[in-house]
Image (cartoon, rainbow, N blue to C red):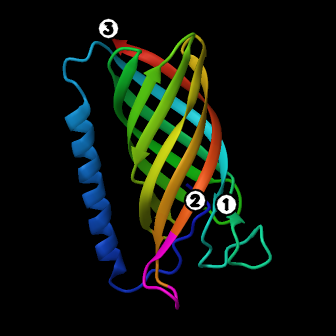
Amino acid sequence: MPGVSAGGSRTGGSTRLLGRIAAGCVVLGSVVLGTVDAAAETVSGQLWLGVGRGLRFNNPYRLSEPLGDTPESVSLAATYLDMGAGVLFGPRSFRQGASLGGAVALQGIGQLVLTPSYLAQFGLDHGVGLRGRVGVPVVVAPDTTLGLEAALGPSIDLAYGLGAMLELVGSVYFGAATDETSITTIPMLSLQLGVFFDHQLSP
């Protein structure tokens, strides 16, 4: 999600990066197609909107807002807005499918991240559920890079398909080279709060 910078791209890196993005999307698509049951009882669509902020555990580009005494310390990432849409197959007790999310930074350097994901949701009791997803975030701007992401959290049905959700998001991004290393890795941990709309598309 926003708050990570890929740094300056190096010559020849873009081609390899695009190849990795394509490979990651192919693998993710294969997982989704392989796990979705064609004879699922119901199909539903889901839209969501959330706001979050996180911690960046590696700061190779000396980004702002370190929490410690040096630029290398754990630092705060930018507050971001997360939007997404997904399709879920199966009964309320266990639904799975795919989603596409988009996150934009609300402060600092303008950033855009698109994340195709495998999405699963477990229905527990009294309108309470557990929602999880695993995806490949692609940083579109300001510099192109990609990473890996997993999120998990509760959801609560309110009324008329509307609900609230909380997600703990763990991710790692791969950035451009620095003087110390050829490929940087930037782990992040974020918390986001949002609302969703769930609508059954077929019985």
Quarter of the picture containing the N terminus is bottom right
Q: Which mark is residue 166?
A: none
Residue 71 in the figure: left or right of residue 19: right
| Residue at numbered disc 1 | 77
Q: Earlier in the sequence, mark 2 or mark 3?
A: 2
> Gap between marks 2 and 3, in whole Å?
39 Å
| Residue at numbered disc 2 | 188
In the current view of this chain or complex, which residue is farthest to the right? 69
Amino acid type of the residue tagged 2 in the rendering: Met
Front position among marks 2 and 3: 2
Amino acid type of the residue tagged 1 in the rendering: Ala
Q: Quadrant of residue 191?
A: top right
Q: Do tag 1 and tag 2 residues touch (Cβ < 8 Å)?
A: yes
Q: Disc 2 on helix, strand or loop? A: strand
* Identity of the residue drawn at 46% across and 52% down: 149
* Identity of the residue drawn at 60% across and 20% down: 156
Q: Disc 1 on helix, strand or loop? A: loop
Amino acid type of the residue tagged 3 in the rendering: Pro
46 above or below 161? below
Residue 175 in the figure: left or right of residue 81: left
**Is residue 104 highlighted in magenta?**
no
Crowd rating for badge 3 (residues with CA inside 10 Å; few <14, some 14–19, many 20+): few
> Gap between marks 1 and 2, in whole Å?
8 Å
Q: Disc 3 on helix, strand or loop? A: loop
* Identity of the residue drawn at 45% across and 17% down: 199
Highlighted magenta segment, given as a residue range: 178-185
Crowd rating for badge 2 (residues with CA inside 10 Å; few <14, some 14–19, many 20+): many
| Residue at numbered disc 3 | 203
Residue 88: % across, % down: 36, 25
